[in-house]
Image (tube, rainbow, N blue to C red):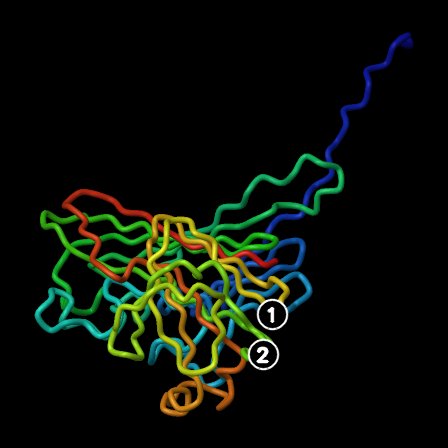
Amino acid sequence: MERSKKPAAIPVSPIQPTPQVSISDDTSRVTANLPTGERVDVLLYGATVISWKSANGKENLFLSSKAHLDGSKPVRGGIPLVFPVFGPPNAEHPTGQLPQHGFARTSRWEYLGKTSSESSSLPNSKGDASVKLDFGLSNSMLPDRKWDYDFNLTYSVTLGQDSLETSLVVRNTGSSNYDFQILFHSYLAVNDISKTTISGLEKAAFKDKTQGGKQMEPAGKAISIESETDRVYTVAPEQAITVLEQGSKRYEVEGDMLSDVVVWNPWIEKAKSMADFGPEEGYKKMVCVEAGSVSSWNTLEAGDTWEGGQRIKML
């Protein structure tokens, strides 16, 4: 017997493409690709982002041609993670036995897994809009106890279609309070440093490390790099900093729960003095604009958690 009304066919939604994550054969790095073509590469040594490419294949981070990627030295370029001390430590401070910029960038991290955002419900969606990679480091993973505190770090790298976010969660798992500093040491790629300016810091006071940390008044104008530059600016949380090339906006850098911005370029002589910096005129192709908390110490009480991060957006 034939039914007068047949059941309607159940519509099948098309399968949306999803981000792809792979681990290199030697387990030294994790790579994530979005369906739209964006890509990020992270070394497990230091959990260092060494490449961030746009959908068209354009590289957004500067990586020295002489950078050590074998885990023998901190990586020169990309986004090294500075923790728990910025710069050379004071011998009298609890971080005094640590190397410059701390141990986070010289430790082997554990890859914890990925999380993808939900894809858009729009019919023209090209798949998931972002993917988050998580990495972990704890005191039990360090080969020595030069910083004698218990901690657990979760570092997240989130690749979006027009942005890259890096965030760190610090958990004090011990019974003692401790102090720390944090910096996302981002080397941004530019076409020509002589035609690059940085806006958003016109009203911010800063310490000039090329003059022994001298406190300077706000410059009142956009920053142009014309010599060795090493400055620590004090900013309002979530203050957006814009990097422009020939007057056109290229990047926007914004910190979350971070009150400092470091601007750095080694210029000619300093670049020559660094054995792992190359090519020789590579300083013309990069500028560091780095969100962090380095002008003072953050105190984390036993059992407490701190979280902060940085977002770089392509404009």
The disc at residue 245 is 1
In the picture of the structure, the residue carrying the numbered disc 2 is 192
Q: In which quarter of the image is residue 14?
A: top right
Q: In which quarter of the image is residue 207?
A: bottom left
Q: Can residue 108 be seen in this view?
A: no
Q: The N terminus is located in which quarter? A: top right
The disc at residue 97 is none
Left or right: residue 161 versus residue 300 is: right
Foreground: 33 or 229? Answer: 229
As helix, strand or loop, the secondary structure at mark 2 comes to loop
Q: The C terminus is located in which quarter? A: bottom right
Left or right: residue 185 versus residue 86 is: right
Q: In this view, does 85 lie above or below 164?
A: below
Which amino acid is tagged 2?
A: Asp
Q: Is residue 261 above or below residue 231?
A: above
* CA distance for labels 1 and 2: 8 Å
State the residue at coordinates (35%, 50%): 308
Which amino acid is tagged 1?
A: Glu
Are discs 1 and 2 less than 8 Å apart at CB? yes
Left or right: residue 272 versus residue 300 is: right
> Pointer 2: residues within 10 angstroms few (<14), some, or many (20+)?
some
Q: Where is residue 173 in the image (x, y as percent from the top left)?
A: 18, 48
> Pointer 1: residues within 10 angstroms few (<14), some, or many (20+)?
some
Q: Position of residue 145 (x, y in %)?
A: 14, 66
Foreground: 64 or 313? Answer: 313
Left or right: residue 25 versus residue 209 is: right
Q: Where is residue 137 in the image (x, y as percent from the top left)?
A: 29, 58
Mark 1 or 2 closer to N-term? 2
Q: In this view, does 133 lie above or below 122?
A: below
State the residue at coordinates (55%, 73%): 196
Foreground: 71 or 306? Answer: 306
As helix, strand or loop, the secondary structure at mark 1 comes to strand
